[in-house]
Amino acid sequence: DAKTTQPNSMESNEEEPVHLPCNHSTISGTDYIHWYRQLPSQGPEYVIHGLTSNVNNRMASLAIAEDRKSSTLILHRATLRDAAVYYCILRSRSQGGSEKLVFGKGTKLTVNP
Amino acid sequence: GAVVSQHPSRVICKSGTSVKIECRSLDFQATTMFWYRQFPKQSLMLMATSNEGSKATYEQGVEKDKFLINHASLTLSTLTVTSAHPEDSSFYICSASIWTTETQYFGPGTRLLVL
């Protein structure tokens, strides 16, 4: 499985933007970049995913480097409810929904009031 | 969005007993379901992948005779921890997906404590 590297932790202030980086230098052409987050004592929650182009949804934006070796998850205005562990995961698109997710350690985001 | 439920949310059992955890996709039919385990302050570890009507595929190091997985329908998968021991105490999480989409939908998790 292609690996990702994320900082162990990051801090942000409420209502400020947050940029969560992820390095994936061994990404292959068939890998999607997925982001999930896990709030304390809950199952993970899908945030966003992309392949080559930047993506936006109601939760966040995903900026993908031109060489695809890194990406950044952007929370435009952090709230206290965004405090969670954020996981950046590469997933091969070859098998669609049957492809497993391999979780790394993720980035623990703390949001200060 | 798609909803996945798990039951029970938490369970306490005696050592040596078996515990069954249910995972249901409430508003969609899941072609594939996954079972994860998470120990305190650690990341999720995939235990097995199951497709409806076929045997589960277990990850290396996961005992298939101890962790029995049944995926009898497109909306229900069960994980049975047989002869549970204190070291099996963990947070068990399931997820479900449809083969045509890229997203996995996770359940809220089941916290198992074996005394």
Image: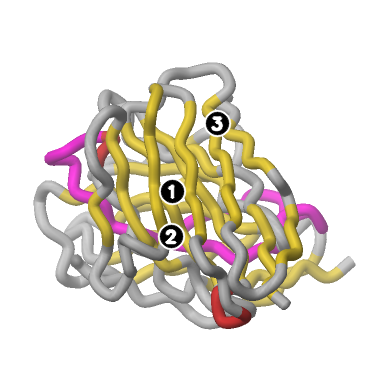
Q: Is residue B69 left or right of residue A2?
A: right
- Residue B34: in magenta span: no
> Residue A23 appears at what percent x and percent y?
32, 71
* Foreground residue among A108 and A39: A39
> Cβ–Cβ below 8 Å for labels 2 and 1?
yes
> Residue B112 appears at what percent x and percent y?
67, 64
* Foreground residue among B40 and A20: B40
- Residue found 56% across the figure and 70% down from its top: B84
> Separation of disc 3 and disc 1 at Cα?
30 Å
Instruction: Give the residue at mark 1.
Output: A62
Q: How is the model colour-coded? A: secondary structure
* Foreground residue among A83 and B48: B48
Residues in magenta? A72-96
Residue at mark 2: chain: A
> Residue B115 appears at what percent x and percent y?
73, 77
Instruction: Give the residue at mark 3.
Output: B24
Q: Earlier in the sequence, mark 2 or mark 1?
A: 1
- Compared with residue A91, is residue A40 higher up or lower down, i.e. above or below? below
The amino acid beneath tag 1 is Leu
- Residue A82: in magenta span: yes
As helix, strand or loop, the secondary structure at mark 1 comes to strand
Q: Quadrant of the C terminus of chain A?
A: bottom right
Instruction: Give the residue at mark 2.
Output: A72
Residue at mark 3: chain: B
The amino acid beneath tag 2 is Thr
Same subunit, tags 2 and 1: yes
The amino acid beneath tag 3 is Arg
Q: Is residue B87 left or right of residue A4?
A: right
In the rendered image, which quarter is residue A90 located in?
Answer: bottom left
In the rendered image, which quarter is residue B30 located in?
Answer: top left
> Separation of disc 2 and disc 3 at Cα?
33 Å
